[in-house]
Amino acid sequence: MLRKESYPIVLIFLTLLLFDCQSEKKEEAPATPSTNYEDLVSLFNEWREFQKPKVTNGVPDYTAAAMKEQRSGLDTFLSRLNAIDCRAWPISQQVDYHIVRAEMNGLDFDHRVLRPWSRNPCFYVVIEQFPTDMPVREGPIMYGMLCLWELKYKFPLSDKYIAEFRMKLRAIPKILEQAKGNLVEEAKDLWFLGIRKKKEESAILADLAKRLAEQHPDLAPEAKQAKDAVDDFCAWLEKKQSHMSASSGIGIENYNWYMKNVHLVPYTWEDQMVIIQRELDLAGARLKLEEHRNRKLPELVPVATEEEYRRRLDDALNYYIEFLRKEEIWTVPDYMYDALKRPTVIGNRRLEERQFIPPSGLRDFFAQVTYRDALPMQCHGGIHWPDFARMTYEPHPSPIRRGPLLYNIWDSRCEGLATGMEEMMMHAGLFDKRSPRVRELIYMIMAFRAARAMGDLKMHSNEFTLEDAVKFAVEWTPYGWLPIEGRLIWFDESLYLNQPFYGASYVVGKVYVEKVLADCAHQLGKKFNLKKWWDELHAAGLIPVSLIRWEMTGFEDEIKRLW
């Protein structure tokens, strides 16, 4: 029995305990339920600001403490999203809900599995010279790198942006010093790639310092200091990486979760293995049949001069655009001419001409194709550049789809559709007035893409090292057109190790787009119209193909499996 004099102490204890429980209960209180689409848009806008790291003087904070705080805050956003009931909304609005869900799951996957800030030196890209042909830079990359290709950094720099440029240069040594403390996990191949990347950045900064010495002498020392910091970081990586043995793949179980919850792809790792192996076999078999049919025809001769190369590029581009219009493939507005012709400007990007490689130089795979006939690869680029143009000239009415989506969840649509375009246009008659041997190039491209994709899958199942993936692609790309000493295959497989599914997305996305075409054709029967199909597909935006299929057909079978 308690003494009377003990009552105040017990009462204070119970009061504090009750207050603590109430506080804890308040923190765990469920989010307010909602059925309003406007609440989703509001949440999306808050989410986009939340997922950015805190930045001080150009230095983003990826320290362990900052990432722990971000991970804790993510739970609140997921709870608020789960409290929104979208089931009675129109399909187009439900699609937006799943886009937001996929993005939040992407950050969750970064924290649970990829952990690029603590595991992957490639994450700390500090400078880029050329833009990507995607909505945003592929792979997990830190926020706020210096992008020399942005229009605002056109040389000589305008007075308006000199201070910003200086700040970004000064931030580079601080970013890399922070990275040394952040990178605490081993991943042998990823660290090897980090070393390669830093050597590339060192060369870019050396060239930048020379240019600044001529046009902005006061900035040249800043570039030199940034280069010294990159070289020091590279040496640090080399010392650490030399003792590593840990694999870099994420494993099949994680890969499958990533497909279902982030990329919204209904195909597992095992499904994708079957799809890609079938595409590789198909490409090899059809190539031989085409070669036999064309055996009495002259070989396609690669161009020998830059003048001839440029002429062929222009001719192929004009032919491609006129074919789209004349054959009513899809609506081609006037602005698309500018979008397809390079060099040009789209949004805030300066797109560069590819340098000509003389016959004595090392011609990588795409040069081998394009120098024989420039038209096949116009099909691929003829998806990417119009995608950029639409975002600029015809922004999507939904604020959630208006800009690039995060975490590369657009890859099945962007790379899959561009890859599918190569073969689909062949069947639509694009190459009929050219040498029949051009069809051989299409099957060569198919084989190359499937061989690359196999490396993606097997690196993440930890069956392949990076070197194994490179060698496999070189072996299965016909006729030695993919030299192992070239930059292309190392760059590609490096990207796929950094960004799971990216290599597979070309092939799996292509097959998925074909499925959407078949579903729509079956659903509409004789009412099906190819031009209308393409226009509706483009109008859906740069979102996962599963969501495009749902919006175009109303079929719910796959989205139910993915949710």
Image: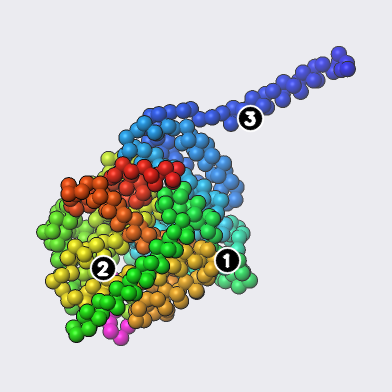
Query: Upstream in the sequence, badge 3 or badge 1?
Result: 3
- Return the residue at label 2: 377
Query: Is label 2 or label 3 in front?
Result: 2
Specify the amino acid type for callout 3. Glu
Q: Which secondary structure lies at badge 2?
A: helix
Specify the amino acid type for callout 1. Ser
- Neighbourhood count class around disc 1 (C-alpha, 10 Å): few under 14, some 14–19, many 20 upward: many
Picture coordinates of residue 555, whole percent (x, y):
33, 43
Q: How far apart are marks 2 and 3 (CA)?
A: 59 Å
Q: What stretch is highlighted in magenta?
A: 354-361
Picture coordinates of residue 180, whole percent (x, y):
58, 60
Q: Please indicate, yes or no, whether residue 11 appears anywhere in the rendered image.
A: yes
56 shown above or below 80: below
- Return the residue at label 3: 24
Q: Which residue lies furthest to the left in this view?
A: 326
Answer yes or no: do the residues labelled 3 and 1 have beta carbons within 8 Å?
no
Q: Which secondary structure lies at badge 1?
A: loop
Identify the image quadrant of residue 245.
Answer: bottom right
Q: Residue 247 carries which label?
A: 1
- Neighbourhood count class around disc 3 (C-alpha, 10 Å): few under 14, some 14–19, many 20 upward: few
Q: How far apart are marks 3 and 1 (CA)?
A: 41 Å
Q: Distance between the residues labelled 1 and 2?
A: 35 Å
Specify the amino acid type for callout 2. Met
Query: Upstream in the sequence, badge 1 or badge 2?
Result: 1
Query: Is label 3 or label 1 in front?
Result: 1
Which residue does the image show at 80% across and 20% down from the upper left?
10
- Neighbourhood count class around disc 2 (C-alpha, 10 Å): few under 14, some 14–19, many 20 upward: many
Tell which of 37 and 437 is nearer to you: 437
Identify the image quadrant of residue 127.
Answer: bottom left
Query: Upstream in the sequence, badge 2 or badge 3?
Result: 3
Majority secondary structure in the magenta region: loop
